[in-house]
């Protein structure tokens, strides 16, 4: 089981979303939290990031992107950024 910690800047964006999108994102994060061992990149649309974002992963939930990194030693997932597809990588 992983612990999911969401940064304030990600929370601010998520609060502005319509209720159905919030529920969908909460469900995906809950599923991530319940995973055993390592984060499965194939179960979700998760891809490792490159360049200045190296070490981070992104998960696609509709048109929303959530950027996170995983601390395997402490079994913690840190959600650092969330936003629309076009703006999140800037």
Image: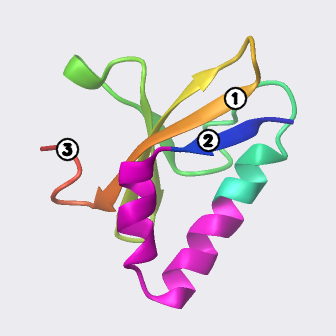
Name which quarter of the figure residue 86 lies in.
bottom left
Tag shown at residue 14 = none
Tag shown at residue 76 = 1
> Mark 2 — residue?
5
Tag shown at residue 89 = 3
Q: Which mark sits nearer the N-terminus, 3 or 2?
A: 2
Residue at 87% in and 36% down: 1
Kindly report which numbered mark, 1 or 3, lies closer to the viewer in this rendering: 1
Across and down, in percent, residue 63 comes to 34, 70
Residue at 84% in and 46% down: 34
Farthest-out residue, top: 73
Seen in the picture, residue 47 relative to 76 is either above or below; the reply is below
Residue 80 as seen in the image, left or right of residue 72: left
- The 10 Å Cα crowd at callout 3, few under 14, some 14 to 19, many 20 or more, is few
Tell me, yes or no, whether the two marked residues, 2 and 1, touch with CB atoms within 8 Å.
yes
Residue 44 as seen in the image, left or right of residue 1: left
Across and down, in percent, residue 36 comes to 87, 33
Name which quarter of the figure residue 74 lies in.
top right
Kindly report which numbered mark, 3 or 2, lies closer to the viewer in this rendering: 2
Residue 56 as seen in the image, left or right of residue 79: left
Q: Marks 3/2: CA distance?
A: 20 Å
Residue 13 as seen in the image, left or right of residue 15: left
Callout 2 secondary element:
strand
Does the segment drawn in magenta span residue 85?
no
Does the segment drawn in magenta span residue 16?
yes
Farthest-out residue, front: 8
* Residue range (magenta): 7-28
Residue at 77% in and 45% down: 33
Residue at 76% in and 24% down: 75
């Amino acid at each position: 089981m992983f612990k999911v910690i969401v940064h304030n800047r990600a929370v601010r964006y998520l609060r502005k979303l319509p209720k159905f999108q919030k529920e969908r994102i909460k469900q995906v994060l809950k599923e991530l939290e319940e995973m055993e061992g390592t984060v499965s990149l194939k179960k979700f649309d998760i891809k490792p990031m490159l360049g200045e974002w190296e070490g981070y992963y992104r998960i696609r939930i509709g048109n929303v992107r959530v950027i996170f990194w995983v601390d395997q030693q402490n079994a913690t997932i840190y959600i650092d950024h969330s936003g629309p597809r076009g703006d999140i990588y800037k």
